[in-house]
Image (cartoon, rainbow, N blue to C red):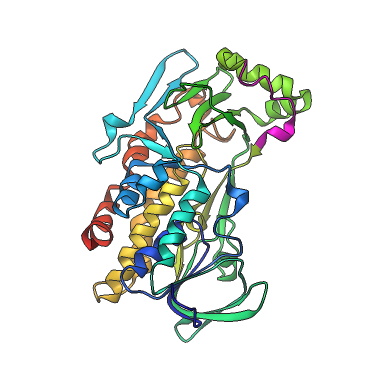
Amino acid sequence: MHENDGHADCGIVGGGPAGLLLALLLARRGWRVTVVDKNAIRDPRMAKIAPFLSPPSLELFEELGFLDELARVGQPVRDVVEFTATGEQRAMDYASYIWRRHPYIMSVPLPTLTGVLHDALEREATAAVLPGTSVRKLTDADGEYRLDLADAHREKTLTCRYLICSDGKFSPMRTAAGIEADVFDFDRPAVFFIHPQPSAWPARVDVHHAPDGSWLGVMPLANEQLAVQWAADPEDFEHVRSAGVAELRARVLAFRPDLHEWIGNLTDWDQITVAYHHVVQPKVWSRGGLGLLGDSAHGMHAIGAQGLNMAIQDALVLADRLIRAAEGELAAPLESYEALRRPFVTELQRYQMRLPHATTQGDQDRAGDSMYAGIAELMANGQPEVRPCFERVVAGAK
């Protein structure tokens, strides 16, 4: 990793997996890249977050040489089983969909994933990572971007030809760049809690639907944890929260009586997380040499577990476009990246916004029906048009 001298071919604000991956792919092609993040890269507050990597993401990390390390703490999931309100069982078997090497998804602790990518960046001579560093000001001048930065010890500046904002769905950098975004609020909160897995728990996700539209998800996570998620209409949620944890336990056991012993120690709302989701749709994904990546470009609901995987595919496409532009193949790399990715991502967002399982504004005729049937192939294979980018930037570069 080089000593930062205040100049980079590409500056990236946001040290999550997508930003670190983009930096690594560019650095391995000799680009001078600098990643800036206001937090530590291995942020301990993220320790309980263990998102799922899809089969294409697993193949990517295998090609990069990281999969063995991730698998040591990861939890594979091979099936998604849905029980509809009428009792019908619908299964998604990853082995039936996948045409790549990994017929499963895998839950990985977020600090492990970011740590692996950060360690790889440290080995690149043209890469720099600035954790604990805030952006005080963004200036666009003469075809370059200048960031006024500050950490706990000093102030500094960074100038770069391309600036990529990867700092979350409510991205301060996107706002600083003057890019407006539409936000759709899902009004059905997700209530979930995590405990150690019971012994011999199967490697699958179970989803149970009730006639009233409420549902329960049970999923194994990394580090031998088990997550239970319950969702209902806002009024029903408020009733359960007012009635207390005993009422929540009763709702869970109505779906899964076999969890009686496992949730017996659930006694306080402090043990429970309530999450509200949003779809974020910026008016544009780029302006000049400034581009949006991951949640900054397209925040989405957790249904389908695609937020991280869409961001990873973003990074692959964006790296491909930037590298090809530098080689004289493209004149407008950020516009080309948006043209490929935005329609695909927008369709997934629209699917989520129509789901009554996530919002009372959804298509209520689908209440109690499958959440995943309409996006099963997407969950397994991602966007097919990303594959050539993977071949050029990763597989072909070895």
Q: Position of residue 31 (x, y in %)?
A: 36, 74
Residue 288 seen in the figure: no
* Residue 178 vs residue 99, the one in the foreground: 99
Q: Is residue 265 magenta?
A: yes
The magenta span reads 261-273
Q: Which residue is outermost to the left? A: 396
Magenta stretch encompasses residue 58 = no
What residue is rendered at 46% in x and 12% in y? 87
Q: Is residue 362 above or below residue 170?
A: above
Image quadrant containing the C terminus: bottom left
Q: Main secondary structure of the magenta part?
A: loop
Where is residue 156? Give x, y as percent.
59, 81
Q: Is residue 113 left or right of residue 390?
A: right
User: Total label count?
Assistant: 0
Task: Give the residue drawn at x 58%, y 42%.
Answer: 48
Where is residue 226, by image quadrant? top right
Q: Is residue 359 visible?
A: yes
> Please, is residue 86 above or below residue 390 in the view?
above
Q: Quadrant of the N terminus?
A: bottom left
Measured along the vertical axis of the image, is residue 216 above or below residue 115?
A: above
User: At which x and y percent is residue 11?
Assistant: 47, 72
Nearest the eye: 151 or 324: 151
Q: Position of residue 358 (x, y in %)?
A: 55, 34
